[in-house]
Image (cartoon, rainbow, N blue to C red):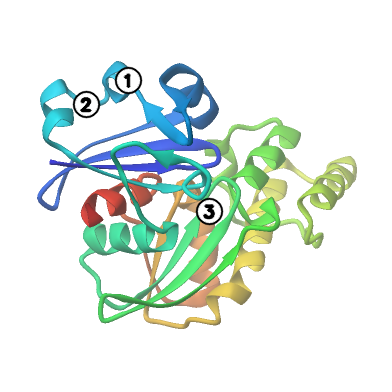
Amino acid sequence: MRIGIDLGSRMAKFALLDGETVVRTAAHDTIGFYKRYGRLEGDELVLDLAATGIFTPTELSGAVLTVTGYGRNTLNLRGAKVVSEIRAHVAGARLQTGLKDFTMLDMGGQDTKVAQVRDGRLADFVMNDKCAASSGRYLENMAAILEVDLDELSSHSDDPVPLDATCGIFGESELIGQILRGFPTARLCAGVNQTLVRRVLPMLRRFPSETLVLTGGVARNRALVRLLQAELGQEIVVPEHPQHNGAIGCAAMG
């Protein structure tokens, strides 16, 4: 058994693998998880995984533990192998899809990663971790302004209202202005999704390929998938566990 942990900025994700089979996945709010199950001893992070109920005592006693994510550069998890975030996500995408040649777009809570994979190896990558305007946090903020949930937001892609601001904060102001102009909620939701697509297109066009693998929590946005398909005209693959892809990759590398 192998356990992978992805300590994300918004969510802590977990995966249990038996060989190449995903046995179980789970997720907790990161801050709440640290408060309930984490403590620092010297410069080491100690997690009480048994108390979480995610894994059985037998699974924990014999498992290899591998970790990546937002906290990996500052938190040394006791008893765990630490791997780079981008390599963990590539490993997860490979295991979940069986593909060896693809471009991966990982859209997380606060950053976006695009990687080029050739013959099963990471060839190149680019990250946007300086601004949350192309991440899940942006969608959460815009959904709150529109007073809809993320599922409703992700259902609209037709006739998007133009939203041109490249900054998440300015984008909120622009969206409020369009609400005041009387545009219907469905078109405003579509506009938010279209804006996200436009922000990631320059990154994607650096690494053209026949197949795009979409991972991260934002991969559950159905409208985003449709809009990307319309813009790129390439096959888009969403793995079975897109939000847990980094944790699955960690376990695969364990």
Say which residue appears at 69% left-offset and 60% top-offset: 195
Q: Position of residue 34 (x, y in %)?
A: 48, 25
Foreground of the two, 176 or 73? 73
Along the polypeptide, which appears first: circle 3 or circle 2?
2
Foreground of the two, 61 or 145? 61
Along the polypeptide, which appears first: circle 3 or circle 1?
1
Foreground of the two, 73 or 2? 73
13 vs 169, left or right, is left
In three-dimensional space, the C-alpha distance between marks 3 and 1, rounded to whole angstroms, equals 34 Å
The reply to whether residue 240 is visible in this rendering is no
Three-letter code for the amino acid on which mark 1 is drawn: Thr
Residue at mark 1 = 52
The quadrant in which the N terminus is found is top left
Residue at mark 3 = 223
Residue at mark 2 = 55
The reply to whether the C-beta atoms of the residues labelled 1 and 2 are less than 8 Å apart is yes
In three-dimensional space, the C-alpha distance between marks 1 and 2, rounded to whole angstroms, equals 8 Å
* Quadrant of the rendered image containing residue 234: bottom left
152 vs 242, left or right, is right
Q: Position of residue 248 (x, y in %)?
A: 28, 49
Mark 2: few/some/many CA within 10 Å (<14, 14-19, 20+):
some
Three-letter code for the amino acid on which mark 3 is drawn: Ala
Which one is in front in this view, the residue at disc 3 or the one at disc 1? 1
Say which residue appears at 48% left-offset and 81% top-offset: 207
Where disc 1 sits, the SS reads: helix
Q: Position of residue 126 (x, y in %)?
A: 54, 71
The image shows residue 170, relative to residue 26, as above or below, that is below
Where disc 3 sits, the SS reads: helix
Three-letter code for the amino acid on which mark 2 is drawn: Phe
